Amino acid sequence: MKIIVHVPVPAASRTVFVPVILRRAVSFGVAAEIPGCVRVNAILENTRFEAPRRRENAMAAADVESLVSAAKDAGRLSLAIGTAIQYECALRQRDVIGEWEPVDEEGATSAYVIGDRQWVNGLTWADISPEWRLTKRTTKTGSVVVFDLSLCPMALELLQEVPEAKRFGPVVIDEKAGRPYAEHAYHREWRKVADAANLPKGLWNMDARAGAATEASEAGAALDDLRPTMGHADAKTTARYVRGKTLEQSRRVATLRVAHRRKG
């Protein structure tokens, strides 16, 4: 008997995620009593996948500036905005551009649906106050991060280019489709622009977050400020004792980063 597990994972991430997803899929099959899954699960329990090397690439401010220029030349302001926010606010990609999840039996809860999947979790203009304060609950840990965009010059300048009449709904919109980027489309279009900007092939969109942490560290940001700024799971306990100070911490980090960038 053949068991087929379809795992739609971007090529650049397969080495990292497939073993984990495969184990979860088989575990589900065991729980659902699907024939053959018990045997496959036993095989996986005795199988060790080579752990992927930790990525060493990190996006720098100059990389973001190059990509922003290329994106605007290509008529893709959305890619410029998405990358700038990921970099300056240290947000994960899915917390900025959103993700597509299956529509459940109760029906869609999102205004954007493609087939049987709906857009969720992305950054919306409702998350940005008139004073340019960004507040977002992150998807991975559920922690709330707050950023003063007036201290994030690249992101702020790009956001201000969006006409006020269009500042509603998702922040990152596929210009050609008039809706959030379809699954995997953002990765594809981002790579085209990255190539036009002459960014290294080994530099991925996800490296914007690593670049944020690297720049902040080099600028001398305190770890106690950086952790809640990035919404790390390890900072949950710390966040309980730092009530109401998340915005001030992210402001300190942003100020240090901009000053460090200017020195370079």
Image (tube, rainbow, N blue to C red):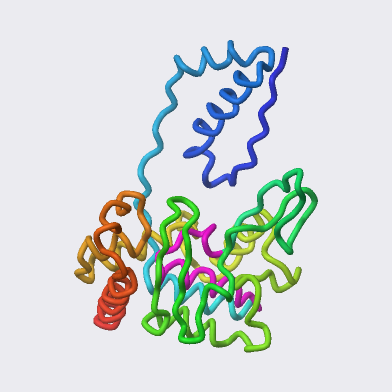
Quick check: 8 left or right of 195? Answer: right
Q: Is the residue 14 above or below the residue 184 in the image?
A: above
Quick check: 13 left or right of 147? Answer: right
Q: Quadrant of the image for the C terminus? A: bottom left
State the residue in front, 224 or 88. 224
Quick check: 65 left or right of 38? Answer: left
Give the residues in magenta: 75-96
Q: Is the residue 206 above or below the residue 66 in the image?
A: above
State the residue in front, 146 or 90. 146
> In terms of secondary structure, what is the magenta stretch mainly?
helix
Q: Is the residue 30 above or below the residue 162 in the image?
A: above
Q: Which residue is found at the position 54% from the left and 69% from the top?
A: 82
Quick check: 248 left or right of 100? Answer: left
**Which quadrant of the structure image shows residue 163?**
bottom right
State the residue in front, 241 or 251. 241
Q: Quadrant of the image for the N terminus? A: top right
List x then y, in percent, for residue 208.
43, 63
List x then y, in percent, for residue 72.
59, 80
List x then y, in percent, for residue 123.
56, 67
Q: Which residue is found at the position 54% from the left and 74% from the top?
A: 81
**Which quadrant of the structure image shows residue 248?**
bottom left
Queried whether the magenta region covers residue 80, the answer comes back as yes
